[in-house]
Image (cartoon, rainbow, N blue to C red):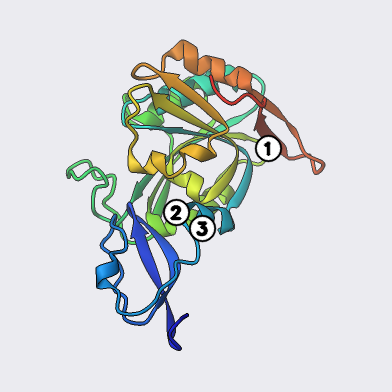
Amino acid sequence: FFEKSVVRKEIYYTGVCYPVIIGVGIEPPQRGGVLDPSRMNSMASICCTRQDWLMKKEPIDAPALVLVGSSGRNAGKTVAACALIRALKGRFPITALKVTVADKAGVCHRGKAGCGACSFSPGYILEEESGPPPGKDTARLLAAGAARVFWLRAARPSLAEGFRAFLEKAPPGSLVVGESNSLREEVRPGCFIMLKNRDGVMKPSAARVADLADISSENDGAVTEEAAGALASRLIIGEDGAGRLTVRPTGEDHA
């Protein structure tokens, strides 16, 4: 079935790189594209689908992490994260994490320029926010009651490495509230919440992980403060056998 010489290459699917095994002479498709049979001059077999590959990767276990994702911009990730912090801060120390991911370091993931969020060398930058200007997401997380707030900016291939660096800095015994779709591809959180707009529109980073959500909350436009606060009642927080903080959903599928 295969040519004698079989090489390992990578396919880009909506901006994410997935290893595949392909026969000699097959050109990889353009990023975001699909394999074109007319371009193949030998047999090939993709060894796993995108979803299979996500399942076969070894995710980083983060049982104390509540991760909030959303179907699109302005869906209310920060509103939800702040509401969770306010609801839980009296029971547990909270560490918040904001994540910005670029497919290529120095290139804005929204196709714009000027804010500087993606202006970093290949790899990642992890910064702790202590008193950012009012209005920034990290300032809102601090104001909501998070004891510490970190901002992780990473090129996509370095996202897992950046998150491990965050784990080394996060205070032991704290509950972590994070905002990101892309992080779910690298991490197994205690609970992954997906905020969805009822218009059905979903950006690629959300589409890749939407079926991994533990809790889905559908809203008309951005999530409201009241709806976001209710998400806290959907969480069960306790300790494992080693005394480490853990969080999990109550078992309901949708809000």
| Residue 173 tag number | 1
Of the two numbered discs 2 and 3 in the rendering, the one whose residue sits closer to the viewer: 3
Q: As shown in the figure, which amino acid type bears the numbered disc 1?
A: Gly
Residue at x 24%, y 45% (from the top left corner): 116
Determine the secondary structure under disc 3: helix
Q: As shown in the figure, which amino acid type bears the numbered disc 3?
A: Trp
Determine the secondary structure under disc 1: loop
Give the class, few, some or many, for how many residues have Cα within 10 Å of label 1's Cα (few <14, many ≥20).
some
The one of 123 and 73 positioned closer to us in this rendering: 73
Does residue 247 sit above or below 183 in this rendering? Answer: above
Question: Which x, y percent locates residue 192?
Answer: 54, 35
How far apart marks 2 and 3 lie (CA) works out to 17 Å
Of the two numbered discs 2 and 1 in the rendering, the one whose residue sits closer to the viewer: 2
Give the class, few, some or many, for how many residues have Cα within 10 Å of label 3's Cα (few <14, many ≥20).
some
Which residue is the site of mark 2? 159
Instruction: Give the residue furthest to the left.
Output: 113
Q: Is residue 249 left or right of residue 239?
A: left
Instruction: Give the residue furthest to the top.
Output: 226
Which residue is the site of mark 3? 53
How far apart marks 2 and 1 lie (CA) works out to 23 Å
Q: Is residue 44 left or right of residue 148?
A: left
Do callouts 2 and 1 mark residues in contact (Cβ within 8 Å)?
A: no
Q: As shown in the figure, which amino acid type bears the numbered disc 2?
A: Leu
Residue at x 34%, y 60% (from the top left corner): 12
Question: Which x, y percent locates residue 187?
Answer: 55, 48
Sequence-wise first label, 2 or 1: 2
Residue at x 26%, y 51% (from the top left corner): 119
Q: Quadrant of residue 188?
A: top right
